[in-house]
Amino acid sequence: MDRKPPAVSPARFASGMTFGQYVAYVGTPENLKREDGRGVRVDYSQFLRDALRDARLSDTQAAAWKWLAARPDGPAKILVISEEWSSDCRRDVPMLARIAETAGLELRIFTRDGTRFGAGLPDPTESPNADLMAQFLKERDGQRFQSIPVAAFFTKDFQHLYTYLEFPAIYHKDRILYGHIRRPRPGETEDQTKQRGGREFMALQASPFFRVWQCAAVDEMISLLYTRLTLGSL
């Protein structure tokens, strides 16, 4: 059965945070006491400010976004679901803020989880934004799960155009992270594997390759929105 297209009301969209409000929230005691699934939550507010400062679109990308936004049926709203402990969110959400600024789009950010880490399907008793997350579940191998970031693009009258999920197609994250970086090496203890894997993944995030995948995400969004607007479907 085909899934219904995502729907959000103007009031629900407006209840989200701007990027500036989201960054401020990230550093609050309220946010830092929430579970992140891996331990003590880190204050990434300054990281996100710096990431927005450093986020750059190429001239071609900027022109493409302006072309898309100028269409009467083009993107006007971006609904984002994010948690700052996610490396994918830290990579893509500041760039989405730059896209919104460049193309004159309205962006609103919602957290995925409530006070507890969101394992399994969205639970409205646990998360105030479960109603949104439930519309953007990732499907793979017959399973549905909560992947972030979500970046859902809507027209000015809230017709859904396209949703970007988690990471661009050319980033083979599962193979790189779980099949290689976090895979136990001969002779390692479980703790040694965890410590080494953490160091290697942090090094990857600081490498040029994360910037490559950030740019690839932008190009993927542009290409699929262009396809949606010119051909009428994806």
Image (tube, grey):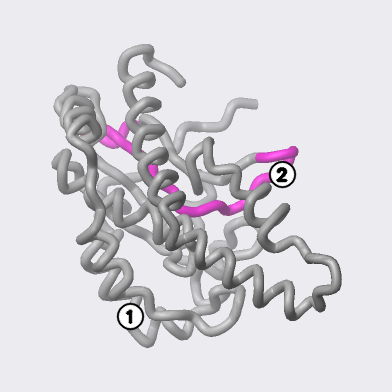
Viewer-nearest of labels 1 and 2? 1
Q: Which residue is mark 2?
A: 143
Mark 1, other Cα within 10 Å: few <14 / some 14–19 / many ≥20: some
Does residue 7 appear in the picture of this structure? no
Does residue 134 appear in the picture of this structure? yes
Q: Residue at x 37, y 74 (%)?
A: 44
Q: Position of residue 28 (x, y in %)?
A: 33, 83
Q: Position of residue 170 (x, y in %)?
A: 52, 37
Q: Which residues are magenta?
A: 140-160
Looking at the rendered structure, the kind of residue marked 1 is Gly
- The image quadrant of residue 75 is top left
- The image quadrant of residue 206 is bottom left
* SS for callout 1: loop
Q: Which residue is mark 1?
A: 27
Find out whether residue 157 is within the magenta segment: yes
Looking at the rendered structure, the kind of residue marked 2 is Gln
